[in-house]
Amino acid sequence: MAIHELSALLWRERELLDLLTFKLEEEQLLLTAGKSRWLPHGTREVEQVLEHLSKAGLARAVEVAAVAEQWGLPAEASLGELASAAPDEAWADVLSAHLNAMHQQTATIKELRDSNEQFLRAAVRSTQETMADLKPAAGTYDSHGRTGPRGRTGDSTPSRLFDQQF
């Protein structure tokens, strides 16, 4: 029966949502710890989970359409509509439980996404401020090896080395 396949796909999708939550929390830990060197790896892993979720969502849509057809509903019926129209109380409960769990998971994911975005914005702002502070104060060495802005002597501003790749 298509309903059994749909239930199995919903479990798989919930597992992927849990994995996405974990990866976003991992990314948040990297951000709060200042371990920005690992962010590209974390971001790549999040993107991979999102790709798997996209495929799982497509497979779910196909199975929902099959179940909806069996139960006399339009092919584009939602999971909530399937739960309401389930011919058996047990399947109504199963589908409702999946739907509620997925709503909770997506709310948690949205919170994590928003929080991570705030951390990233703060990091970008901090980096921009640091670079702005360094730019005018950066000096050079004069022909005598003394530091000062643009090689002038007598200025007490120390020279700084800064990696231009940033």
Image (spheres, grey):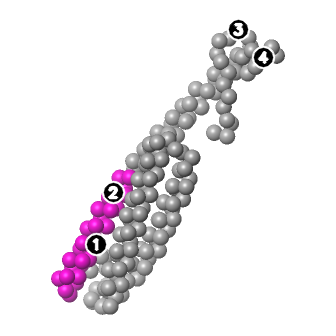
Q: Do the CB atoms of the residues marked 2 and 1 lie less than 8 Å apart?
A: no
For the C terminus, the image quarter is: top right
Amino acid tagged 2 = Thr
Q: Is residue 96 magenta?
A: yes
Residue 77 location, quadrant: bottom left
Span of residues in magenta: 83-112
Q: Secondary structure at mark 2?
A: helix
Percent across and percent down for residue 134 are 61, 27
Residue 98: numbered disc:
1
For the N terminus, the image quarter is: bottom left
Residue 145: numbered disc:
4
Q: Do the CB atoms of the residues marked 4 and 3 lie less than 8 Å apart?
A: no
Q: Badge 1: few (under 14), some or many (20 or more) residues near its Cα, within 10 Å?
A: many
Q: Secondary structure at mark 1?
A: helix
Q: Label 3, label 2: how many angstroms apart (C-alpha)? A: 58 Å
Mark 4 or mark 3: which comes first in sequence?
4
Position of 2 with respect to 51 (left or right) is left
Amino acid tagged 4 = Gly
Residue 22 location, quadrant: bottom left
Mark 2 or mark 1: which comes first in sequence?
1
Q: Main secondary structure of the magenta part?
A: helix
Which tag is nearer the camera, tag 4 or tag 2?
4
Write down the residue under mark 3: 154
Q: Name which residue lies at 32% across and 58% down.
A: 107
Q: Do the CB atoms of the residues marked 3 and 1 lie less than 8 Å apart?
A: no
Write down the residue under mark 2: 108
Q: Label 4, label 2: how many angstroms apart (C-alpha)? A: 57 Å
Mark 3 or mark 2: which comes first in sequence?
2
